[in-house]
Image (spheres, rainbow, N blue to C red):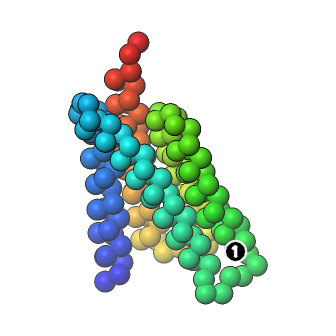
Amino acid sequence: MSMRLMQILGLAGLLPFVAAALGVMFLDDLLLALSQRTFLLYSTAILCFLGGTLWGETLPEPTVGQGATILVSNGIVVFAVLAMLTAQPLLAAILLMLGHLMLLWYERQLPQRAIWYTRMRSWLTFVAVLSHMMFAVGLMWRAPF
């Protein structure tokens, strides 16, 4: 049951990415601004959440070999916050997208991962990255030349 619940929650978690990216592409004025902020904050929140899941994997008994995982879990949160502090939506989106890809790459290096989880995380990250690209296209499409 928990595997199925994780899959459902993972898919549901993609909805804000897709909705906000579409909002940046097709909405105007206040709704455009809301979509832009929502997308960037949500992406930051998801990266922080995923960083926290890495930290949680080291519990209840952290071992010597898990030091890198603890550092990555904290580093990804700092990276996400610094991306937001650029105050440049396009740059922030690109950095956050890279953060999602880096985290997936790191997770795939970890031993003893369930195959279903690795597949799920790969697909979820693929859609999240695609949403970041849609967001970037929406911003560039609207940019004055």
**Direction from residue 73 to residue 129 in the image, left or right:** left
Q: Quadrant of residue 68?
A: bottom right
Residue ID at (40%, 25%): 140
Residue 72 is at least partly visible in this image: yes
Residue 105 is at least partly visible in this image: no
Q: Residue furthest toward the bottom? A: 60
Q: Where 47 falls versus 23 (above or below)?
A: below
Q: Quadrant of residue 30?
A: top left
Q: What kind of element bears circle 1?
A: helix
Residue ID at (38%, 16%): 144
Residue 61: percent from the left, percent from the top?
Answer: 66, 87
**Direction from residue 35 to residue 78 in the image, left or right:** right
Tally of numbered tags: 1
**Direction from residue 135 to residue 62 in the image, left or right:** right
Residue ID at (31%, 53%): 16
- Circle 1 packing at 10 Å, graded few (<14), some (14-19), many (20+), is some
The amino acid type, in three-letter code, at marker 1 is: Gln
Quarter of the image with the N terminus is: bottom left
Q: Look at mark 1 in the image and give the residue it sits on.
A: 66
Quarter of the image with the C terminus is: top left
Q: Residue furthest toward the right? A: 64
Residue 29: percent from the left, percent from the top?
Answer: 26, 31
Q: Where 50 falls versus 2 (above or below)?
A: above
Residue 41: percent from the left, percent from the top?
Answer: 42, 50
Q: Where 11 falls versus 35 (above or below)?
A: below
